[in-house]
Amino acid sequence: MLADANGLVEAVKKAAMDVQKSTKPVNVYFGEVLSKSPLAINVEQKMLLGEKQLILTRNVTDYMTTVTVQWTAENSVPPDGETAAAPAHTHNIVGTKNFLMHNALEKGDRVILIRQQEGQKFIVVDRIGGIG
């Protein structure tokens, strides 16, 4: 009979822990990028995550974006050693242009991660303190 009571106590403890975990919808972690390719992140010096465990947001990836621009390009100074002066000119750059945003993670970047509830996946939200 005592063994059954111990089993019941353990079941109640487990149920209480499950309830407590379910009231925390998000677990936030901090990590450091150990390598860029393949991507590896050391999380709080406790676990090493690889590419298959990571979901990357646009904040931490290279991506293309379209922007509206309007500026005037002016004369440039010739590189050192060149004596021929460039003809005087200006031209407008106007319209929508595609730009590649170089935002991929680099070795040494410190990052913020969110653990998927009861999962093995981690969302890499952003860098800590900006790039670098």
Image (cartoon, rainbow, N blue to C red):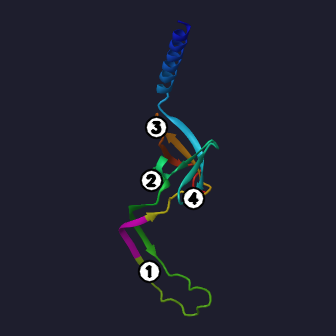
User: What percent of the width, then of the height, locates residue 19?
Assistant: 48, 21
Picture layout, residue 31 above or below residue 23 = below
**Mark 4, secondary structure of its residue:** loop
Q: What type of secondary structure mainly makes up the magenta span?
A: strand
**Mark 1, secondary structure of its residue:** loop
**In which quadrant of the rendered view does residue 78 lie?**
bottom right
**Sequence order check, earlier mark of 2 and 1:** 2
Q: Is residue 43 magenta?
A: no
Q: Which residues are magenta?
A: 92-99
| Label pair 2/4, CB-CB below 8 angstroms | no
| Label pair 4/1, CB-CB below 8 angstroms | no
Q: Cα distance, mark 3 to mark 2?
A: 21 Å
The mark found on residue 119 in the picture is: 3
Instruction: Farthest residue to the right: give it.
Output: 45
Badge 1: how crowded within 10 Å, few (<14), some, or many (20+)? few
Instruction: Farthest residue to the top: give it.
Output: 1
Disc 4 target residue = 106
Q: Cα distance, mark 2 to mark 1?
A: 35 Å
Disc nearest the viewer among 2 and 1 = 2
Asked if residue 61 can be seen in this view, the reply is yes
Disc nearest the viewer among 4 and 3 = 3
Badge 4: how crowded within 10 Å, few (<14), some, or many (20+)? some
Left or right of 41 in this view: 117: left
